[in-house]
Amino acid sequence: MSEERLIKVLLAPHVSEKSTAVADRVHQHVFKVLRNATKTEIKKAVELMFSVQVTQVRIMNQKGKLKRHGARRGRRSDWKKAYVKLATDQDINLAGVE
């Protein structure tokens, strides 16, 4: 895996009430990732970008929601998210405030 590919794997952190609770409770962080990313790529990308030790990666395909705009129906794109578990003494500061 090239470093270029690893940099492109992580699209954005997924911030929600559930992801914040999971981060506080069990040292897991949630990221939106490329649809074709593998667990190994995600692990290496997080370790490269944040200089932390990853112990486990779980991935989930999220189906896009059905939406209506007046009489027309549409669908949002499907996406993939990754739950990344860190070692107990590790942490990622996504807010940028130290």
Image (cartoon, helix red, strand yellow):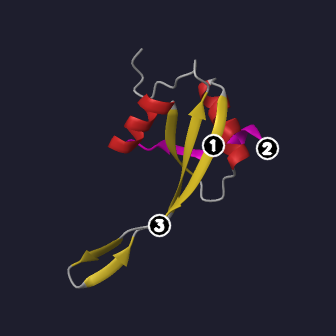
Residue 7, horizontal then vertical, whole percent: 64, 40
Residue 44, horizontal then vertical, whole percent: 70, 36
Residue in the picture at 49% in, 42% down: 30
Residue 93, horizontal then vertical, whole percent: 46, 24
- The Cα atoms of the two marked residues, 3 and 2, are separated by 28 Å
**The C terminus: image quadrant:** top left
Residue in the picture at 58% in, 39% down: 84
In which image quadrant can residue 21 be found?
A: top left
Residue bearing mark 1: 57
**Identity of the amino acid at label 2?**
Met
Indicate whether 98 appears above or below 74: above
User: Which one is in front in this view, the residue at disc 3 or the one at disc 2?
Assistant: 3
Residue bearing mark 3: 63
| Numbered range of the magenta stretch | 1-15
Residue bearing mark 2: 1
Mark 2 near mark 1, Cβ–Cβ under 8 Å?
no
Residue 90, horizontal then vertical, whole percent: 57, 21
